[in-house]
Amino acid sequence: MQDRELLQKALQNKNMMVLYRDDLMAPETAGIPVAVENELVVLHRQTNFALDGYAALRTGDITEAEQMDDVPFLKKVLTAEKVYDAVKALGFCCRNWQTLLEGILARYDGWAAVECEGNPEESLYFLGRLQKVDGRYLTMKRVDALGNWLADPLVLPLDEVTLVSFGDRYLETFRKYCK
């Protein structure tokens, strides 16, 4: 990843960044880096001038990193809205998918949204609760858009995972109302 230095600087300075991933389902993600590792970058996600959960992305998928808050107006708004003050470190290890997902199991009751590579004709986005993680696979109990649990657990190879989001209002709402 050629933008590693820029991301390390953004991590230290709490800079708002946009990470681009060409040719993937969610091609851009905005937030403040809270971890920059060899395999993963984790952002405290920003939407509408507020932080809402985290997104972990594979470093190898990042095609460009751009600082957003070098524009005076954005810096002013983000400061006034106390976005920088709200940034929180994860509090668990995230060297790779396995350690990140184990942290999500422990801290977020396993609730996550997982995006993976594959055939665009099939679903590549899964929402639900992680059940198990090992060195090669994750097992997840999925929920559909209507809040119904699907009977069969999903087993995904970790090397196909491209993005995991967790700790956001969207997932908290599903967790609260899914039976």
Image (cartoon, rainbow, N blue to C red):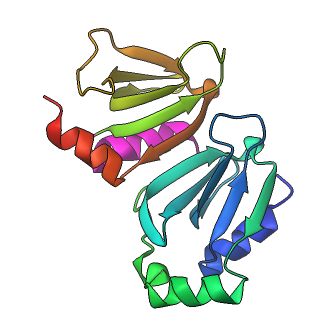
Query: Residue 136, position in %: x, y?
Result: 55, 22
Query: What's the residue at 63%, 78% (across, down)?
Result: 12
Query: Which residue appears farthest toward the top when viewing the image?
Result: 152
Query: What's the residue at 56%, 23% (across, down)?
Result: 124
Is residue 65 depicted above or below 88 in this figure?
above
Q: Is residue 149 left or right of residue 59?
A: left
Q: Toward the viewer: 119 or 163?
A: 119
Question: Magenta stretch: residue 125 in it?
Answer: no
Is residue 179 depicted above or below 48 in this figure?
above
Query: Residue 17, position in %: x, y?
Result: 66, 67
Picture mark count: 0
Q: Is residue 178 left or right of residue 111?
A: left
Query: Residue 49, position in %: x, y?
Result: 49, 72
Question: Magenta stretch: residue 100 in it?
Answer: yes
Query: Residue 110, position in %: x, y?
Result: 31, 38
Q: Is residue 146 visible?
A: yes
Question: Magenta region: which residues?
Answer: 95-109
